Image (tube, rainbow, N blue to C red):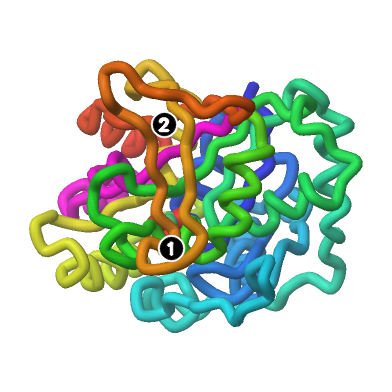
Amino acid sequence: LKKVLIIADPGVDDAFAIMYALLHPQIEILGIVCEYGNVSQDIALKNTTYLLDLAGRNDIPLILGAESPLTASPPEFFYNIHGLHGLGDLVPAIEIPEYIHPFKMVYQLIEEHEGDLTIINLSRLTSLALTFIQAETNIEQVKQILVMGGAFFVPGNRTPVAEANIYGDPQAAKIIATYGGQVTFVPLNISNRAVISPEVTKKIVAQNDTPFSKIIQPIMNYYSKQYETLLPSINGAPLHDVTLFSYLMKPDLFHVVDRQVLITTDGHSKGLTYADFRPNPEYIENYPMHQIIIDFNIEAFIDDFIEIMST
Ligand code: BDR
Ligand code: CA
């Protein structure tokens, strides 16, 4: 059983990642930190509440994440891509619970599950960076940190060079890359190819007997429509955030390389992630070695996604 703490900004692909994790028999979610990103922090909380409610899993702690980047600059949101309420055309009719766990619960979970907890970061790196700036927390206590972020020598999705999760708070990303020990980056290089076509969505919906059967099609319709302009060459839309869970559960489907990851925090290339992919890379002293996922078995990814999302 994999114990995970999720940090997310649902958002369509985050919502699919959370649904996948909820449905997976080998994943135990210990908490979900909701932060700003695709949508505002309160909408992230609302959408997560909605998904947990559908699944009958209101026992999973909701934790209050960051509201804005570390520099306190105003966050940008992406309702154009994710829908007015962050879940396509859906309007989740639900209230945020009165009690949301304070952020310090993250430290408690890390302590309590020392050596056994994986952090899955699906949004900006702000809350994650706060964990390691403010705490008491020793990074060594976390088993593994997976970050959806980066674009290594491929076009970005927020700027020509930057991926949205890194661009949204590059200072936080830099803190994690510099002090966060070994982090596994799951970049656009693979997540842009984790494309769910309308045919796959139809198949899942047809076989679906889960609490999510009614929401998959409308969420996906909206999101895919936006991707017709964002990535015109694909048929469907990429579920970036799902790839982290698929890597967690089926690492053999993914090709991982060890490289140091550097982050640019300002200027024209703000949010750029880079690594030395030359045959004989030069390494920086006293800087952690990270993992970058650069390739994966797309067909096997899709098969696994269909299997977990259907019953
Ligand atoms: C990442 O940014 C967010 O919009 C998505 O949910 C994903 O985590 C892709 O760049
Ligand atoms: Ca996300």
* Callout 2–callout 1 Cβ contact below 8 Å: no
Question: How far is the residue under mark 2 from the one under mark 1?
Answer: 20 Å
What residue is rendered at 66% in x and 61% in y?
A: 34
What residue is rendered at 48% in x and 31% in y?
A: 260
Judge whether 116 appears above or below 76 on screen: above
What residue is rendered at 19% in x and 51% in y?
A: 197
Counting from the top left corner in percent of width and height, residue 220 is at 31, 63
Classify mark 1: residues with Cα within 10 Å, few (<14), some (14-19) or many (20+): many
Counting from the top left corner in percent of width and height, residue 296 is at 28, 28
Q: Which residue does the numbered mark 2 point to in the structure image? A: 292
Query: Tag 1 or tag 2, which sits nearer the N-term?
Result: 1
In the rendered structure, find residue 60 and report the number of the disc placed on it. Answer: none
Image-based side of 304 in relation to 100, left or right: left
Counting from the top left corner in percent of width and height, residue 291 is at 47, 27
Image-based side of 260 in relation to 158, left or right: right
Residue 13 in sight: no
Judge whether 25 appears above or below 130 on screen: above
Residue 292 in sight: yes
| Residue 199 is inside the magenta segment | yes
Magenta range: 182-209
- Pick the residue in front: 308 or 175: 175
Counting from the top left corner in percent of width and height, residue 310 is at 38, 40
Classify mark 2: residues with Cα within 10 Å, few (<14), some (14-19) or many (20+): many
Q: Secondary structure at mark 1?
A: loop
Foreground tag (2 vs 1): 1
Identity, as a three-letter code, of the amino acid under mark 2: Ile
Q: Secondary structure at mark 2?
A: strand
Q: Which residue does the numbered mark 1 point to in the structure image? A: 270
Which quadrant holds the C terminus?
top left
